[in-house]
Image: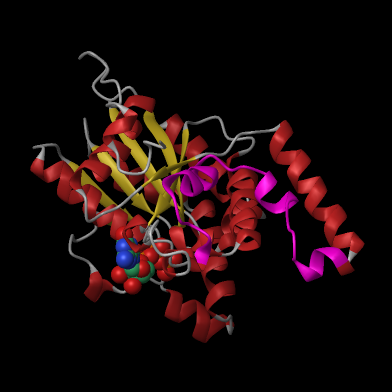
Amino acid sequence: MRYAVLVTGPAGAGKSTFAKSFMTHLAASKRTGHLVNLDPAADPSSFEYEPTIDIRDLISLEDVMSELEYGPNGGIVYCFEYLLQNMDWLEEELGGYEDDYLIIDCPGQIELYTHHPFIPTLVQHLSRMDIRTCATYLIESQFMEDKYKFFSGVLSAMSAMVNLEIPWINVMSKMDLVTLNPEDPSGGARNGLRKKKDIARYLDPDPLLIATTRGDKSDKTNPRFHALNQAIVQLIEDHPLVSFLPLDLTDTDSLEYVISHIDYTMQYGESEEPKEPHDLDEGDFQDLE
Ligand SMILES: Nc1nc2c(ncn2[C@@H]2O[C@H](COP(=O)(O)OP(=O)(O)OP(=O)(O)O)[C@@H](O)[C@H]2O)c(=O)[nH]1
Ligand SMILES: [Mg+2]
């Protein structure tokens, strides 16, 4: 059986860093992992692991930009359309690996997740090749500093995951950047995150975070903005599809916790007993009291 984990999410969310840590974890657990780089704009000097498969061997972003006069974003979208038209290349590259675990690092162009059939098409090909696939969607913890930015992240995660028939895990990355300071009413409160309970309202998005906007001028003065927020609240209440696993790469337990969820959703090693993800209250951010 082969397994693939898609690492997706907006620009700078920490996808490549997570993919790298994932590879290190697999190596430490004596599991064979292969890195697949699907980001045509990836900087090869930053690779700690040489990708086994690299979209840059199929198409060069520089060529697309210079010959077709695309900018970087349009260029990446073009590269992906080219990949989707040349899936036999990927199938051939993937051909030789049995019983392996592929970590597929994707680019951060949000368009690829929201307005292009890129992920669904890729997933169809992977499943045709009998590769069990799950997707991760990362957003970074700084999104919690701005509730509007955060909810736009939630909506983008929802729009990317809806209609996909594979397991999907949302991850709140860079949790090491979140500082809690319950003593100091101003210090830790820059982002309103003073308690673990506040973080929990983001990990399991509480739509009331945008419904209760006391003192928020734009909401008071602009009734249409208010109506939009109400509609978003309703949407999330009616379809509570999105919740996040916190990921703090400075804490091995946190990485293992996320990976155990990924293994579990794919029933990794089906001949063995499936491993239950270990208990929630071992993590730092789950024990709310
Ligand atoms: N503090 C902290 N910084 C991180 C973490 N993960 C990534 N970063 C930093 O965030 C920046 C972006 O990380 P990448 O892993 O390149 O993010 P990406 O999602 O692959 O970015 P694109 O491929 O450009 O979309 C880098 O400067 C990383 O060092 C983390 O867990 N904690
Ligand atoms: Mg990257």
Q: Is residue 152 at all visible to an observer of this figure?
A: yes
Residue 83 horizontal/vertical position (percent): 48, 56
Where 111 falls versus 231 (above or below)?
A: below
**Which quarter of the rendering shows the N terminus?**
top left
Residue at image location 17% in from the left, 42% down from the top? 26
Q: Nearer the viewer, residue 172 or 74?
A: 172
Where, by quadrant of the figure, is residue 51 drawn? bottom left
Q: Nearer the viewer, residue 64 or 169?
A: 169
Residue 134 horizontal/vertical position (percent): 42, 35
Write down the region rendered in magenta. 191-220
Where 103 falls versus 265 (above or below)?
A: below
Q: Quadrant of ligand 1?
A: bottom left
Q: Is residue 88 at all visible to an observer of this figure?
A: no
Where 49 falls versus 283 (above or below)?
A: below
Residue 203 is inside the magenta segment = yes
Residue 166 horizontal/vertical position (percent): 50, 31
**Which quarter of the rendering shows the C terminus?**
top left
Residue at image location 78% in from the left, 53% down from the top? 229
Where, by quadrant of the figure, is residue 37 drawn? bottom left
The answer to whether 85 appears left or right of 107 in the picture is: right
Residue at image location 17% in from the left, 45% down from the top? 25
Farthest residue to the right: give it. 223
Residue at image location 25% in from the left, 20% down from the top? 275
Q: How many marks?
A: 0
Residue 139 horizontal/vertical position (percent): 48, 55
Residue 68 is inside the magenta segment = no
Where, by quadrant of the figure, is residue 201 drawn? top right
